[in-house]
Image (cartoon, helix red, strand yellow):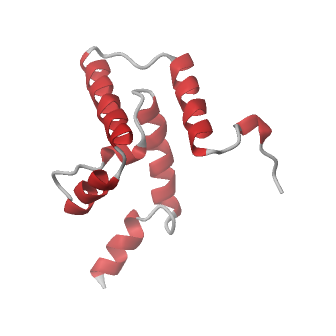
């Protein structure tokens, strides 16, 4: 019972408060050039370690670069410049094959 409740509390797909928390946290992470998924620690969870081992080397290297840049910015008490945040987000959308936000239509 407690396990099911705990899973529901932290699942952003099922709990609107968890989704709001994820959105807010993602917004703050973007200031450092990070993604929400970059928070998963491979030393803490063996499934994350296995998933990172299965990813192409370029993606893992990009993740490591994001983490290093975020630590550097954090130590300097700075944020990633706003124009770089937007450029990186657009490049990521293009790489994933998603339409830019201004080309999307609501059905």
Which picture quadrant has residue 8?
A: bottom left
In percent of width and height, residue 67 lies at 30, 32
Q: Residue at x 29, y 34 (%)?
A: 64
Q: Tell me what residue is drawn at x 33 percent, y 41 percent.
A: 57
Q: Is residue 78 left or right of residue 16?
A: left
- Is residue 81 shown above or below 52? above
Q: Nearer the viewer, residue 32 or 61?
A: 61
The residue located at (29%, 51%) in the rendering is 52
User: Residue 17: x and y, percent?
Assistant: 49, 58
Residue 97 percent across, percent down from the top left: 63, 45
Task: Give the position of the N terminus as an image quadrant.
Answer: bottom left
Above or below 45: residue 7: below
> Which image quadrant: the C terminus?
bottom right
The residue furthest left is 43
- At x 60% / y 31%, what residue is drawn? 90
Is residue 1 shown left or right of residue 16?
Answer: left
Comparing 11 with 84, the one in front is: 84
């Amino acid at each position: 019972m407690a396990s099911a409740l705990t899973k529901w509390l932290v699942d952003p797909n099922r709990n609107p408060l968890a989704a709001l928390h994820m959105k807010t946290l993602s917004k703050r992470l973007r200031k450092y050039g990070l993604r929400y998924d970059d928070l998963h620690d491979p030393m803490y969870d063996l499934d994350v370690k296995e998933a990172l081992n299965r990813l192409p080397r370029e993606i893992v290297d990009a993740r490591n670069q994001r983490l290093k840049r975020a630590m550097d910015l954090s130590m300097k008490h700075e944020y990633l410049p706003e124009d770089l945040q937007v450029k990186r987000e657009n490049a990521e959308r293009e790489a994933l094959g998603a339409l830019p936000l201004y080309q999307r239509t609501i059905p």
